[in-house]
Amino acid sequence: MLLSQAAPLLRFVDFVGFAMRARGLWEGHGRLVDPLYPIGYPALLLATRLLVGDVLLAGKILALAAGVGACLAAARLLRPSAGWLLLGLPVMLVWGPVEGTDVAAAALGLGGLAAAGHKRPALAGLLVAGACMCRYTAIAALPAALLLATGGRLRLLAALGLGLLPHLGLALATGSSPWPDQSYNLAIAAGRPTALWSMDTLRRWPDGLRHAVEAMAAPGLGRALVLLGAAGLLRGLVARDRKAAALLLFGGLHLGLIGLAFASERLVLPATFCASLGLAWWLPGRRLAPVALVLLAWGLLHPPEEDPHRARLDALVQAMDGLPGPFLSTDPWVYSRHEGWLQQGVPPRAAGPDRQLQPHVLVAFAKEQGFRIIVADRPRVRRSYPGLEPLLKEGPIDGLKPLPAPDGWFVWEVLGAEAALKRPGPPGQRPP
């Protein structure tokens, strides 16, 4: 909670997409089935937003619940000191307070393992299903839960099917495929369009897996914890400890799935959690608790360095607070807050080719499509939109009115734009 309060604005810009999808569900034009992200988290975000009135606050509440849930799951699976250990991990202190699906999926996956280990197969199946409804890659928790569920595996699978029924039912009702489609992420990883089931992906997989392991064992204290923990899990495996085997299976399968595309510290959080918990096999009994509390104290006293771009972005968002959308923005990370919702900007390239784009063309496009605000930042304009250089000056521009903005940003109101409500589709997206 302290870390969350220290950053009251958005900490991870990908959350804007989830917030917009939640708004789309509320307004009746949201994607019910998405090949990249399941519907579970946006639906939960919408429900929480309806309770608290602000989607960013809802995201922060869910982030705190996920972080606490992950620690409780670790405590239940192993012992209470394991929960303190997870809380004190550097990656938890960085990503635990951050809005998004990653910690939530990891928490539900670990919860499924804990329930299975305590002979509650139905609950385990529902928790694993909840993890999969946050991120498709959470299916890696299923084999580990089945390993721990020495009895009642059919009940676990039945509960899993019940938990996935909303996703499967929506896919059937809309005629969509229930399977995830990672072609977009695969194309990013390969640098070209490619297919999941292909020799191209198979050849890249070992290198992708290596990058995933490197992302999990980032330099510094976190790397030492991951390496020692992984060795601890191997020690437990040699001793035929099912819990060590389950954590190895969950973390290993997750790394394998992430390695098919591309990896980052955030994307491999479940594997990092699983590996780090292996420290419990090196520190039996109550010896783990002091180490965990020292880690927690060290992390709170040495917070990560502030991202300078996020600080600039926060200043702009505060200046734009309450401005009506939708808006065009040269910086893809810009978002605005309005009436309890978040809205992402649309890049100017929607109006025409980047380097040939001129202000009068952009203004005409904005009026036609109902964009109320244009945001420009000096570095991206000069790098990607040189024709929009007049937006970086204080001189008058036909059809635009300058608005107050922090240093380095230029915010313009579009005069005579059509009402945004006349534009079909989700706010902030260009209609097809």
Image: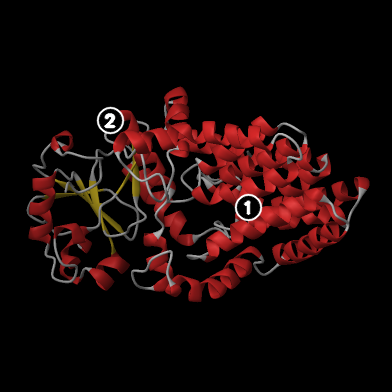
Residue extending farthest top: 51
Residue extending farthest front: 154
Label 2: few (<14), some or many (≥20) within 10 Å? few
The relative height of residue 295 versus residue 50 in the rendered view (above or below) is below
Whole-number angstrom distance, CA of label 1 to CA of label 2: 33 Å
What amino acid is at disc 2?
Answer: Gly
- Residue 46 placement: quadrant: top left
- Residue 215 placement: quadrant: bottom right
186 left or right, relative to 352: right
75 left or right, relative to 25: right
Q: Which residue is mark 1?
A: 270
Q: Is residue 264 visible?
A: no
Q: Which residue is mark 2?
A: 28
Which of the labelled discs sits on residue 410, or is there none? none
Name which residue lies at 76% across and 33% down.
Answer: 119
Q: Position of residue 52 (x, y in %)?
A: 47, 25
Q: 350 or 316, which lies in front? A: 350
Name which residue lies at 15% across and 69% down.
Answer: 387
343 left or right, relative to 100: left
Q: Earlier in the sequence, mark 1 or mark 2?
A: 2
Name which residue lies at 72% across and 38% down.
Answer: 116
Q: Position of residue 47 (x, y in %)?
A: 45, 27
Q: 343 or 48, which lies in front? A: 48
Q: Secondary structure at mark 1?
A: helix
Q: Is residue 58 visible?
A: yes
Image quadrant in which the N terminus is located: top right
Q: Mark 1–mark 2 contact, CB under 8 Å? A: no
